[in-house]
Amino acid sequence: MQLTGNDGVNMITHETPKKGFQTTIGERNVLIILLGIGVLSLAVATFFDKNVTTTVMDQNSIFGNVFQNYADQGAGIVSFVAFEIIAWTIWRRVQENVLRYVVTAGALAFALNQMLAILQDMLSYTYSMFNNLSKGIPMGVANNTTAEKNYPEILRWGLAVVLTILLSTIFYNWIQSKSEANVSYLVTAALVGIVVVFVAQTTIGDMKSLWGRFRPYEMTTVSGQVMSEFTPWYHLNGINGHNSFPSGHTMSGWLFLYLTFFVPRGHVSLQKKMTIFGIAMGILTAMSRVRIGAHWLSDVTVSSIIVGLIIFMASRLLAAHFVEPTTDVLKQ
């Protein structure tokens, strides 16, 4: 462990493995607060899910549409960054030329695939939104369940290739500028990040299928009964093609929080900004899904709790704080 200074701020970096790693008081307090809000929100949703939706739902909400179109990318961005780090670490460490090119290219191909997935969602929702506007229907009726290919495929591939080349250049220079200790940490964070995305997507995806819950905008009036297909969050309907519970967008929104662990451990200021950004994306994405009528309050609450806990457990595995303690904190 080494203490360093940067811009007049004393910080802590991962030069050697941490011993006696412990959750800080700040982390514990934030965790308790967020869990408390989650439990309270779930309690409210247990009794008032329908009331909340009927009060706030608006498929023409700009706020709801912006987050529907562009906040579902957390999982893809974490995976993209992870594969870029792995690719250029391989390039840096492998000396045999043929193997170096082949393995690096393979990792970059995975990164390109993630960029394609990111753009598929963004383009699909955007095109659906503008198509709805042209027809005079609520713009939030954009396909909420899965991305559709309603855009020129050449546009997606062209953007993906250009963006991957540009960002790969940035990641190459970034990795080359780091110390071996920082690169080792970043590779570990990349591998754990891939696992986090897989676990989060698998958990939320399996629960969606098992619960078979209708979304708010799917409610109809059978036999004159409003919201006749509504079921409380604790009721399992089985596989029926409906997948409101838990929220996938909310999962991706919270995964932005994992990006703080791609910040080298010496950059405390950037860690703070990325942590605030990640928490804000998680909360705002959850709120937007209820606003646009794509999910119930309980859908986004349970997703937030699950993914938040997955990220927190991953941070303990990494022995990395969301914001590393400064020397002043360590002296207390």
Image (cartoon, grey):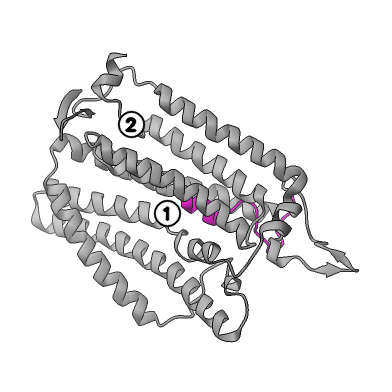
Locate residue 105 relative to residue 157 in the image: left or right.
left
- Residue plotted at (46% across, 25% down): 28
Mark 2 crowd level (few <14, some 14–19, many ≥20, 10 Å Cα): many
Is 250 a magenta residue?
A: yes
Answer whether residue 243 is visible to the viewer in this image.
Answer: yes
Label at residue 74: 1
For this orientation, the residue located farthest to the bottom is 135
- For mark 1, give the secondary structure: helix
- For mark 2, give the secondary structure: loop
Q: Are marks 2 and 1 in contact (CB under 8 Å)?
A: no
Locate residue 7 relative to residue 48 in the image: left or right.
left
Provide the residue span drawn in magenta.
Answer: 236-253
- Residue plotted at (49% across, 48% down): 282
Mark 1: which amino acid?
A: Gly
Height in image: 50 above or below 125? above
Mark 2: which amino acid?
A: Ala
Residue indicated by mark 2? 320
Front-lying residue, 62 or 149: 62
Height in image: 130 above or below 24? below
